Amino acid sequence: MQLRSSYTGILLKALLILGWVAVIPSRADSIYNNLGPGDTWIINREWDTNFDFMATPFVTTAAGNLGGILTPLFNLNNPVSLGLYTDSGGKPDSLLEDWNVTAPGFPGVLTTIPSVQNPFLSANTEYWLVISLTSAQKNNLAWYQNNQGVTGGIWAGTALGSLIELEPDSPSPAIQLNSITSSAVPEPESRIVIAACLALVVIARLKRCHYGSNLAATTLRRRYLKYSTSGRMECSVSAQGPQAI
């Protein structure tokens, strides 16, 4: 019974370790970021327009699957429609993912935009983040500027193919794009190796317990035989002893 409990304990530990490996959280890395330390921006300088679109291009500093976007917005007429686009000839091209989000109705708060499709973004590549404005949002939706000296102004227009750059020497909107990397989570092949190693450890421990139990039983049997051959039948040591499970 004691050995069976020992087996069960070893197996449970192995399962717990495998479960822990399976739920290690992913780690977020920055694909692009012009927010200041502590996720800050210029609180009293923002972009707004009476055009149908306003947009900001950016060049990624790292590659990865998009995990989410942070950007400071102020809006009283939700939802806000945003889209992430590839670039072609200095204009937005193919849509990678779009969102309808609720922006805060007071300044000083970042809008969190989680990615569902997790498109892959290449490093050192230009992309566009575009806001589509409703009539109620024109000249009312505010997109705050970065405080890191990244210029570019704002791009605006009535169509994505005809956006124009306004005030290019002014700070561009503050944005941060994060990736969800798999570096903190073992790849399937790594998990197989880990599982195999744990299985070997469990087998080794089980064999050790099995060998130990057989050795104990054999020792007791030998003692019984020794006493038997010497004629000391009064010995109370059992011939069976503990049995290996």
Image: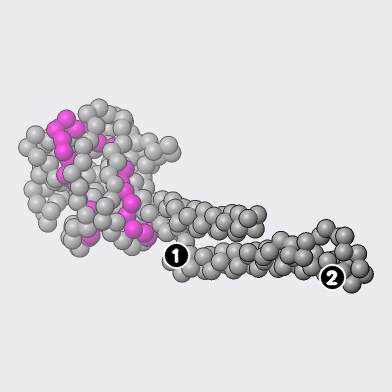
Decide: is 19 above or below 78: below
Which residue in the protein does label 2 denote? 225
**Residue 69 inside the magenta-drawn segment:** yes
Q: Residues within 10 Å of mark 1 (few under 14, many from 20)?
A: few
Which is closer to the viewer, label 2 or label 1? Answer: 2
- What kind of residue is marked 2? Leu
Q: In this image, 50 relative to 211: left or right?
A: left
Q: Earlier in the sequence, mark 2 or mark 1?
A: 1
Q: Is residue 80 visible?
A: yes
What quarter of the picture does the N terminus occupy? bottom right
Which residue in the protein does label 1 denote? 187
Magenta-colored span: 61-87
Towards the viewer: 230 or 36: 230
Towards the viewer: 40 or 100: 100
For the residue labelled by badge 1, is the local secondary structure a helix, a strand or a loop?
loop
- What kind of residue is marked 1? Glu
Q: Position of residue 15 (x, y in %)?
A: 51, 57
Q: Residues within 10 Å of mark 2 (few under 14, many from 20)?
A: some
Q: Total marks drawn? A: 2
Q: In this image, 198 relative to 37: left or right?
A: right
